Image (spheres, grey):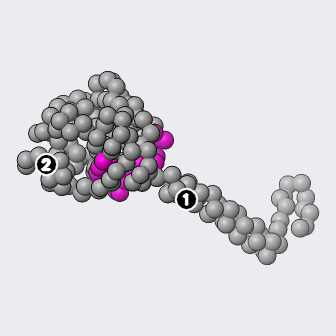
Amino acid sequence: MTHRSASSFLALSPSTARRQALRAGAALLAVALLPAAGAAESELAVGSALPPLSVNDQFDRPVVVDVGTRLVLFAADKAAGDVATEALKAHPDVLAQQRLVYVADISGMPAVITRMFALPKMRDLPFPVGLVRDAQLTAALPRKAGMLTLMVLEGGTVRGIEYLPDAAAVRSRLGIAS
C-alpha cells in the first residue's frame, strides 16, 4: 500500500485488490446460498408433522390448520391463487366436505395493493382463504412456481404432496364436477 496526501485515499495494488474482490465475492456467494440450502433442508416432506398454522381469512376470521385438517391447498404465488379461485369458486362446499383448508401466501404483496385491490376481490369469494402475511409461517411448505400444493394429512402428519397445475387438475383431484 502507498500512503498519499490527506485529500486522497489509500490505494491497493492490482493483485491485492483482485484477491480482496475474489474473497468478497466468495463470501457473498456463500451468504446468498445459505437461505436456499436451509430451505431445502427444512422443507416438509411425506412423513413430516405439519406444524399448527393459524392465520386470518379475507374477513379477518381465524383459519386454522390442525390435526382435524385432512387436506391443505397452498398457493405460494398469485398464479397458484388464480388456479385455486377458478377451481373452487363454483364449489365452496368442498372445503368443509373434505376438511380442506385453503391458504395463500400474500406476504410479498405490497400492503396498499392488498388493502385496495386484493382483499375486496377476495371478499367476493364464496369460501375462506387463509391469508399468510408473514412468509416465515409457510417457509417450510413445499411449492412449485405457478402450481398449487396439495398436502394430504392424517392426524397432522403429511401423508402425500401433490402439485396441481390448473383448475381441472384441482377439480379432478378433489372429485368435483367441472
Point out the stretch of residues depicted in magenta: 135-152
Q: Earlier in the sequence, mark 2 or mark 1?
A: 1
Q: Residue at x 28, y 24 (%)?
A: 59
The picture places residue 172, in percent across and down from the top left corner, at 14, 53
Give the residue furthest to the left: 177
Q: Is residue 87 above or below residue 111?
A: below
Secondary structure under tag 2 reads: loop
Name the foreground residue: 161 vs 58.
161
The picture places residue 8, in percent across and down from the top left corner, at 84, 58
Estimate the spatial distance between the alpha carbons at disc 2 and disc 1, rounded to whole Å: 37 Å
Q: Are marks 2 and 1 in contact (CB under 8 Å)?
A: no
- Give neighbour class at mark 1: few <14, some 14-19, many 20+ (Cα, 10 Å): few
User: Can residue 134 be found in the magenta stretch?
Assistant: no
Q: Residue at x 67, y 66 (%)?
A: 26
Dot 1 amino acid type: Ala
User: Can residue 144 be found in the magenta stretch?
Assistant: yes
Could you say which disc has been placed on residue 37 in the image?
Answer: 1
Secondary structure under tag 1 reads: helix
What is the quadrant of residue 104 in the picture? Answer: top left
Q: Is residue 3 above or below residue 105?
A: below
Residue bearing mark 2:
175
Dot 2 amino acid type: Gly
Could you say which disc has been placed on residue 92 in the image?
Answer: none
Give the residue furthest to the bottom: 15
The picture places residue 75, in percent across and down from the top left corner, at 32, 46
Q: Does residue 15 appear to the left or right of 4 in the view shown?
A: left
